[in-house]
Every structure is written in structure tokens, then in C-alpha cells.
Image: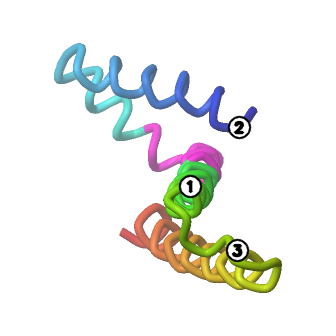
Amino acid sequence: MILFFSVAIFLWLLEGSLSSEQGFEEVKALFANPLCQFIIWGSLAALAYHAVMGVRHLIMDLGFGEDSFETGRATAWVAVVVAAVIIVLITGWVFLW
């Protein structure tokens, strides 16, 4: 559900930034708002988690990591750790840079 609304937000921001120089400046000013930064961060975090878990499922569809329950559980934890690292990087990008 979050990703569905995130796509609409990202497309709206993209359209606004590409419409004109003034539109770009308005979108740039919008990113200075902490609430907007939080919404962008949440959207990107959900997208990162979704993408990492999707790659895990694609790898499992190829036949890797589905030998036993323990292997599936281990790959799930690896995917969660990878997603957490990516989310930390996203946090730095959105709030610090």
C-alpha cells in the first residue's frame, strides 16, 4: 500500500521538477521540509525492502536456498540485514546530504 502511494508522490515530484526552472526550485524547497523528508525516507525504505526481498525470491525461484526450512530462514535474515544496511544508507542520503 505504501509503495502504491509512493509511486504517485514520486511521479508528482518528477513532473513538478521537470515542468520549469521555477517548478524545480519549488520541489527543491519542498525537500527542505522535515515532513517531506520523512515521507520520502519512508517511501524509499519500503522500496528498498521490497526490492531486496524480491531479489531473494527470484534467487529462490532458481532453486537456491530452498533446501530446508533452516536455509530459507537464514536467507531471510541475510535479506533483512541487507535491507537494513540499504535503509541506513538511504537515511544518510535523505537527512544528512
Image quarter of the C terminus: bottom left
Residue position marked by numbered label 2 in the rendering: 2
Q: Residue at x 41, y 27 (%)?
A: 13
The answer to whether residue 67 is visible is yes
Q: Position of residue 2 (x, y in %)?
A: 71, 37
Q: Are marks 1 and 3 in contact (CB under 8 Å)?
A: no
**Callout 2 amino acid:** Ile
The image quadrant that residue 61 belongs to is bottom right
Q: CA distance from mark 1 to mark 3?
A: 14 Å
34 drawn magenta: yes
90 relative to 22 in the view: left or right: right
Q: Where is residue 4 shown, x and y percent of the image?
A: 64, 28
Query: From where the camera sits, is residue 37 visible?
Result: no
Sequence order check: which comes first, mark 1 or mark 3?
1
Q: Which residue is denoted by mark 3 in the rendering?
A: 76
Q: How many marks?
A: 3
Nearer to us of marks 1 and 3 is: 1
The crowd level at tag 3 (other Cα within 10 Å; few <14, some 14-19, many 20+) is: some
Q: Which residue is mark 1?
A: 61
Dominant SS type (magenta): helix
| Color theme of the render | rainbow
Tag 1 or tag 2, which sits nearer the N-term? 2
Residue 92 vertical placement versus 16 (above, below): below
The answer to which of 36 and 91 lies nearer the viewer is 91
Seen from the viewer's position, the closer of residues 67 and 21 is 67
**In the image, what residue occupies the spot 46% across and 61% down?**
94
Q: CA distance from mark 2 to mark 3?
A: 21 Å
Q: Residues within 10 Å of mark 2 (few under 14, many from 20)?
A: few
The magenta stretch is 30-43
**Label 1 SS:** helix
